Amino acid sequence: MIPSLASRHSWFEATARARLAGLLDPGSFAEILPPAESQPSPHLAMLDLPGAFDDGVVVCYGQLEKKPIFAIAQEGQFMGGAVGEIHGAKIVGLLRRAVQEKPAAVLFLIDSGGVRLHEANAGLIAISEIMRAVLDARAAGVPVIALVGGSCGAFGGMGIVAKLCSAIIISEEGRLALSGPEVIETVAGVEEFDAKDRALVWRVTGGKHRYLMGDCAELVEDDIPAFRTGVAKLLAGWQEAAPGLAQLRASQQVLENRLAAYATYRDGLQVWAALGIARPDSVPLLDRDSLVALKEGLPT
Amino acid sequence: MSLNDILDALFPAGHTVAVANQVITGEATTAQGTVAVLGTTDAAAIDHAMALALSGFVLDTVERHPGRPLVFLVDTSGQALSRSQELLCLNGSLAHLASCVDFARRQGHPSLSLVTANAVSGGFLSFGLMADQAYALADAQVRVMDLRAMSRVTKIAHERLVELAGTSPIFAPGAGSYVRMGGIAAIWPVPSADLLDDALSAARKAVSAGDQRQGTGLSRGGRLLASDIATTVQNATAGA
């Protein structure tokens, strides 16, 4: 076996449980409502579909560098990480618990296409409940950190949830958006968005683009220890002011400016050029460290 | 029913509401004083510009009129489906709008939403479902996806979905399903100033009660699992 491959622990390819095992301090993982105490979705059973005893999400306590942490990990390999009734309720319960117990952070390992269509109404309402619960946790002073780098990315309602978190850590392989490219292609045509053009999909929704635009706080390698280091770095000396009018006004201004400047663009290459990157074509080829250095050197 | 007819029925004492780019902003007189009126019309597909117009108006209201109730009128076919919208992180603008509605709640602004015609997925999540209480007119369409599209995506026969939709509110499109699931407080047969007055009173109480939708869904028999599971996770000692 090639050593460099053996020592690499791809976040993208790992299961939710493997991500947690590598993210938290060894031996600190303690699952709440583990599969043995739970039940698969009766709504999937009604449609003769196989369920999972954890309904595609793990909620747990743990520690990260000895700090008490809550974590939520969606399993992209089960129903695309989509949110159904049980799945959503586990997340809401953990976020509410965080308001009471005030861990150092809630880590939200998002890997989801959004609402589970087989439980569409339950999923949509659950995502709305998750949105409010994330904001409640943050208002209680508990940072909620989204980690995005799984095969399903963060789409649909879970894309909105990700952007409601205190910060997002994303890998180059991570994707963050609202509608999936396939949905846009189906409705608006292949000229609008060719979902099979993977390079284009990454230039529009991928981790590098979101990081360059400032939508994600940190870009990390597709590597479980890199996500761990990223979280630790972000939490060291974490300070977050309670949301206030001035801060929301500032966000509003940033978003309005961005829309005014880039509204007609359709490709990351155009945005990167406008950001002041001399050779936008080179961005997809840059490694993580070079890209971070490039962003830090940009005019603000 | 036209937007003006709806506004006249809800606010017989008067309203000053402008519509630009399918976004409604303005104010109206009610039995409980002046309220902010905002939302979308004509099945708006919510894009960055619409989301930011709404969030800007919420922030203006918080700044200039402390405590003024927010009445959202919801008519959205979902989110705008385009590459340029996604390029600029449409989920980010929708999240910003949701944050502003949530901030208004924390500042003591009661809020309610009324689905006047359509409420679909992302568009509904960003403001309609962020209000303290959501209502819908009797003929409103509330859904994630219609059953034909759901059948294509899930590869489950359309007839099967139609049959199951008759008994299960879990995925059946319709405001009635959302009432049973706790996502919508009630269906209004017609827009009415009296129903609005009652709803404003209920929203004032809801402000401090927190999110009660799981419990409502349980008591109405539509969402039987969520409430218990969330409570169990909240109170369980860690496994191991």
Image (tube, rainbow, N blue to C red):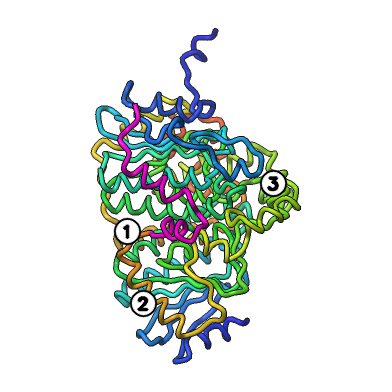
Residue type highlighted by circle 1:
Gln
In this rendering, position of residue B212 left or right of residue A115:
left
* Residue toward you, A116 or A43: A43
A175 over B159 or under it: above or below: above
The question of residue B227 being in magenta is answered with yes
Query: Quick check: marks 1 and 2 in contact, CB under 8 Å?
Result: no
Q: Position of residue B121 (x, y in %)?
A: 57, 58
**Residue placed under numbered mark 3 in the picture:** B153
Residue type highlighted by circle 3:
Val
Q: Which residues are magenta?
A: B212-240
**Residue placed under numbered mark 2 in the picture:** B201
Q: Residue at x 60, y 42 (%)?
A: A44
A103 over B66 or under it: above or below: above
* Residue toward you, B143 or B169: B169
Nearer mark to the viewer, of 3 and 2: 2
Which of the numbered marks, if any, corresponds to residue B62? none
Q: Earlier in the sequence, mark 3 or mark 2?
A: 3
Residue type highlighted by circle 2:
Ser
**Residue placed under numbered mark 1 in the picture:** A247
